[in-house]
Image: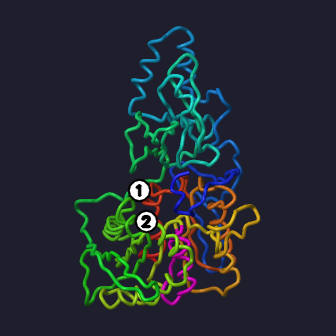
C-alpha cells in the first residue's frame, strides 16, 4: 500500500473488514462535539449509524461480471460481433475507469478498471488508495477478448489514486485515464466533495512565502522553515492568528497551503493567519520528530514560536494558534498541544497515526500490541483548553493498526472528556489527493470567522 511511510516503516499487515459510515451523494459525514461531549455522525443534518458492508470495495468473485457495459460487450462478442470490441476500446479511451450506477443504491457506484492485453495480462494487479481488501487484486479476462477488468463497488463520494502492477515492471498509470495526480492516475466519483480552494485564482490577492533558518538547541541542529504572511500583511497593526504545519515541503507542493489560505481569506471563510511550515531534514529525521519526540515538541513550544514572534506579528493567544499535520504529523500536532497547551490551543489532524506506541518500529505487531499510546495520555490527563479537528479516510483501515479505527478511538476519548471537536470522515485513502481539499474544512472549523 502506498504512502506507508506516513505511518511507519514496516510492512502492511492482514486486512480486516472495513467499517464504513453511511455516505450520501453530494455530502460529507461530519461529527461535531461541544464542551458537553455529546455528538453524532451527521449527513445532511440527519443522524446515521456506522455499519459493516462486507462487499463494499471488495473484488467480486472471479469471472463474475458486475458491469452492465461489459455484460453487453460479452454478449455481442459471443454473438460474433467482433466490431463491437474495437468500438468499445474507442469509446473508453480517455474515459476509464467505467463508472456505473448500482440499482437501488444511490450511495454506491460500480467502478470497473480496464487493461488491454493478451495472456501476459493475467498477472496485472490493481494497486491504489481504496479499501484494503481490494489491494493487489488481479484483473480478469473477458472471454474471447483482450479486455481485462476488475469491478469494485465504492462510495459515490470517493476520490482516490491508483495504478497497475506487472511483474518486473514499474507501476503503470492507466493509459485510458487522462487524470493524473503526481505519478498516479486518479478518480473522482460523481459525488466526491468539491475542492474549490486549491486552485490559484487570478483575482485573489496573494500572500508571501519566505524561507528562514534557525538553530535549535533542543534538537542540536539547524532547521529550515517557510513563513507565509497573508495578503496585506501589516507588521505593526495587523491582527493575525498562527498556523504551524509539519512536512513543510508537502504543504508547498501537493498540498498548496499558501493558495488555500489566500482563497479562504479572500472568501472571508477564515481570519488571516501567519503560517510556519516546518521542513523535514530527512525521512529519518521525520520519523524521529513526528513520533511524539519530546525535544521536537520543545523546539516548537520553546524555540520556534517565540523566535517567529520576534520577527512576525501574530497573536500570542493559544486559542488563535493552530498546530497541524498529516499522518504522523497529525499525531505529533496532538502531542504538541498536550505538552504545550499554553502555546497551541487548536489541533488540525488529517489521518493522524494514532496507533503509535513507543518502540513500535522495533516490535513485531499483532492484535495484542499496545496501540494508541497518545490516546491513553488523554484518558489519564485532565481536560485542557484545546479544540480539535480530526479526520480520517474510510479506506484507511488496515489491521491491526487500523488508522480509521484509531481515529474513532481518539474522537470518542476526546468527546468523553468534554473537548470541543469537529470530526470528519472522507471516502478516500492515505494521500494528499484527499487531504489537499479537506485541510480547508479543518481551517474553517478552527479559524473560521464565526469562531
Q: Is residue 191 left or right of residue 132?
A: left
Q: Is residue 275 above or below residue 78?
A: below
Marks 1 and 2 in Cβ contact (< 8 Å)? yes
Q: Which residue is mark 2?
A: 440
Magenta stretch holds residue 336: yes
Tell me: 116 left or right of 240. right
Judging depth in this view, the residue of 165 and 243 nearest the camera is: 165
Quadrant assignment, res 424: bottom right
Image coordinates for residue 215, horizontal then vertical, percent: 37, 85
Circle 1 packing at 10 Å, graded few (<14), some (14-19), many (20+), is some
Residue 65 pos. (x, y %): 62, 27
Name the residue rendered at 52%, 62% in the picture. 6
Residue under label 1 = 195
Q: Nearer the viewer, residue 17 or 345?
A: 17
Q: Which segment is the magenta one?
A: 328-349
Q: In the image, which disc is placed on residue 33?
A: none
Amino acid at each position: 500500500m502506498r504512502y506507508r511511510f506516513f505511518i511507519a516503516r514496516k510492512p502492511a499487515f492482514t486486512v480486516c473488514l472495513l467499517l464504513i459510515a453511511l455516505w450520501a451523494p453530494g455530502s460529507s459525514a461530519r461529527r461535531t462535539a461541544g464542551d458537553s461531549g455529546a455528538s453524532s455522525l451527521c449527513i445532511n443534518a440527519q443522524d446515521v449509524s456506522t455499519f459493516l458492508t462486507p462487499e463494499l470495495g471488495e473484488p467480486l468473485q472471479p469471472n463474475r461480471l458486475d458491469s452492465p457495459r461489459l455484460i453487453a460487450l460479452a454478449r455481442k462478442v459471443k454473438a460474433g460481433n467482433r466490431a463491437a470490441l474495437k468500438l468499445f476500446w474507442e469509446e473508453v479511451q480517455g474515459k476509464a475507469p467505467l463508472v456505473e450506477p448500482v440499482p437501488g443504491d444511490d450511495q454506491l457506484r460500480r467502478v470497473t478498471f480496464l487493461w488491454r492485453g493478451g495472456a501476459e495480462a493475467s498477472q496485472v494487479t490493481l494497486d491504489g488508495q481504496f479499501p484494503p481488501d481490494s489491494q493487489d487484486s488481479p484483473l480478469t479476462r473477458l472471454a474471447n477478448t483482450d479486455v481485462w477488468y476488475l469491478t469494485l463497488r465504492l462510495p459515490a463520494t470517493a476520490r482516490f489514486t491508483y495504478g497497475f502492477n506487472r511483474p518486473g515492471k514499474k507501476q503503470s498509470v492507466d493509459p485510458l485515464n487522462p487524470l493524473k495526480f503526481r505519478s498516479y492516475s486518479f478518480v473522482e466519483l460523481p459525488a466526491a466533495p468539491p475542492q474549490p480552494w486549491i486552485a490559484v485564482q487570478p483575482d485573489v490577492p496573494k500572500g508571501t512565502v519566505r524561507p528562514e533558518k534557525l538553530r535549535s538547541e533542543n534538537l542540536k541542529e539547524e532547521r529550515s522553515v517557510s513563513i507565509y504572511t497573508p495578503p496585506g500583511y501589516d507588521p505593526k497593526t495587523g491582527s493575525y492568528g498562527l498556523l504551524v504545519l509539519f512536512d513543510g515541503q508537502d504543504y508547498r507542493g501537493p498540498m498548496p497551503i499558501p493558495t488555500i489560505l489566500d482563497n479562504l481569506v479572500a472568501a472571508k471563510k477564515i481570519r488571516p493567519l501567519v503560517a510556519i511550515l516546518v521542513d523535514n531534514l530527512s525521512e529519518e529525521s521525520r520519523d524521529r520528530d513526528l513520533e511524539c519526540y519530546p525535544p521536537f515538541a520543545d523546539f516548537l513550544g520553546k524555540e520556534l514560536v517565540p523566535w517567529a514572534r520576534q520577527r512576525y506579528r501574530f497573536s500570542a493567544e493559544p486559542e488563535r494558534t493552530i498546530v497541524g499535520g498529516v499522518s504522523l504529523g497529525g499525531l505529533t500536532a496532538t502531542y504538541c498541544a498536550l505538552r504545550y497547551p499554553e502555546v497551541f490551543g487548536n489541533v488540525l489532524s488529517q489521518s493522524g497515526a494514532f496507533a503509535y506506541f513507543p518502540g513500535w518500529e522495533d516490535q513485531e505487531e499483532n492484535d495484542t500490541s499496545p496501540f494508541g499510546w497518545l490516546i491513553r495520555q488523554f484518558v489519564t490527563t485532565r481536560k485542557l483548553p484545546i479544540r480539535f479537528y480530526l479526520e480520517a479516510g474510510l479506506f484507511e483501515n488496515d489491521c491491526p493498526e487500523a488508522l480509521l479505527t484509531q481515529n474513532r478511538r481518539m474522537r470518542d476519548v476526546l468527546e468523553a472528556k468534554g473537548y470541543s471537536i469537529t470530526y470528519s470522515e472522507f471516502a478516500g485513502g492515505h494521500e494528499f489527493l484527499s487531504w489537499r481539499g479537506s485541510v480547508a474544512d479543518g481551517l474553517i472549523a478552527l479559524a473560521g470567522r464565526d469562531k
